[in-house]
Structures are given as C-alpha cells and as structure tokens.
Image: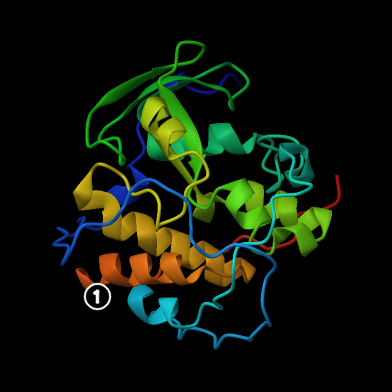
Amino acid sequence: MTPPTSERRPHRYRLAPLPALALAGSLALTGCDALTGPPGPSVTPATPAAGGTALQAVETLTVKGRAPRTGYDRDEFGSAWADTDRNGCGTRDDVLAEQLSGVARDADGCKVLSGVLDPDPYTGTRIAFVRGRSKVDIDHLVALSDAWQKGAQQWSAGKRRAFANDELNLVAADSSTNRRKGDGDTATWLPPNKAYRCTYVAGQVAVKVKYGLWVTAAEKAAMTEVLSGCPQQKLPAGSSPTEAPAR
C-alpha cells in the first residue's frame, strides 16, 4: 500500500518550553580556541546521574587541549545519512520527518519531499522545506571535525558511524546559519536565537557525555556560562547505541 503523502509530527523541541536565556556576559562567537597541541593526560569523568541537569553534567566532562585535525575526513564517519537504526529509511529523512510539520513523503514511505520547519531553532523563523530547493540542513550539534579533534580519531569505524547518525546529535536548521557555524564548539559559536541556546548547549553536553568526548577549558567555561542562566535545564537522553551495526 502506498503510504499517505502527508503527515504532521510534533517538532522535537516542542516537547518542553524553551527557557529564556540571560547571559551574565557576552560570549565570543568567533575565533580559535587558545588551547592547542597534543591532548594532555586523560581523567575518567564521573557518570551524570539519570535525570540530572546539563549544568551538573558539564562538571563530569574531561578537559584537554584540542588535538590536531590531522587525518580528518568526512568519510571516516561512514556514508552520509546511513540507515543505522535499520528502519528502512536514511537518517536524514528520519530527522526531517520528526522535526518538520506538514510532511509530504515520496511513495517509498521514506523520502521527505516537503514540510515546514517552524520554528527554525537557530534563527527562530519559519522555513519551508522543499526537496531539491531546501534551505534546511541537518546539523551535527557536535561537529564531526570537532569530535575528531576531541577523541573520535581513536574510535572504531562503527562508533564513528553511530555518532554521525545519532539523532541525539542531529537537528534540522537554517542552512546559511549552520554553515556559518562550521565546526565551532560552544566557545566559538552559539545560535543567534537566544531562546534556543540552553537547549543547544545541553544537547552538546549530552552528546559529549554519551560518547566520551573531551572539551577544552574555553569550551567548558562557555558551556557553564550559558547553562548557569538555565540551571534546571535537563540533560537530554538518547537511546541509540554508540556502536553502529556492521554494514
């Protein structure tokens, strides 16, 4: 049977109201991290308590300098938008179907042809999605290059594939804003939509905790500053495994 061509799903960030953010001071949104060079000694962090806050979880993250980007390649994280959850649809379409409203699909039941991102988390605006003429990207909250420099270069191929396709680490967002972000971390880039910053940073913390990635001193300070404005922000949880099945 041909699946229905449209459906409406709740935006994943409408599950809870977005907290307003009051920053104690301004954060630098550009520039490079001052900590460079080879990583220092590893310290095993404590595991955050279930149901704890993102601010508490920041304290469990290991702090090291950023490792060299040597050897990084997108292909190290597997083919883009692989079907790691084995539901028959690629990750990109899974994320679009979950986060857009008014979704229309192709007859295959997977390919998202159109929908609406309202609001776009990074800008707070409404963006129409039309396949092939899209202004919507699927962004990695923790960029692949950032992960590579903070632990992922030591991972198995399966763990890197899981990371690149983990919906805990993926968000549909305005393409031009996402491309300005590049591979920035919390210390170098935050969404222009201030109402989303607590959710955004909490998501980055959750991903780094789940996969055991470290943070730089500047990154941890920036995370702490943002989350101090919303100390009750919960740490998001993700149920997908950290090792993708063999292809």
Residue 6: quarter of image: top left
What x and y, as percent, mark residue 66?
A: 60, 62
Q: Name the residue under label 1.
A: 232
Which is more toward the observer, 26 or 196?
Answer: 26
* Residue at (58, 53) in percent of width and height: 146
Looking at the image, residue 86 sits to the left or right of residue 198; the answer is right
Whole-percent x and y of residue 203? 42, 59
| Vertical side of 106 occupied by 21: above or below | below
In this rendering, the answer to whether 198 lies above or below 46 is above
- Please tell me whether residue 218 is drawn above or below residue 244 in the rendered image: below
Specify the quadrant that holds the C terminus. top right
Question: In the rendered image of this protein, does residue 5 appear above or below residue 91?
Answer: above
Q: Measuring 32% from the left and 42% from the top, which residue is drawn there?
A: 10
**Position of 21 compared to 138: left or right?**
left
Amino acid type at circle 1 is Gln
Q: Residue at x 46, y 31 (%)?
A: 179
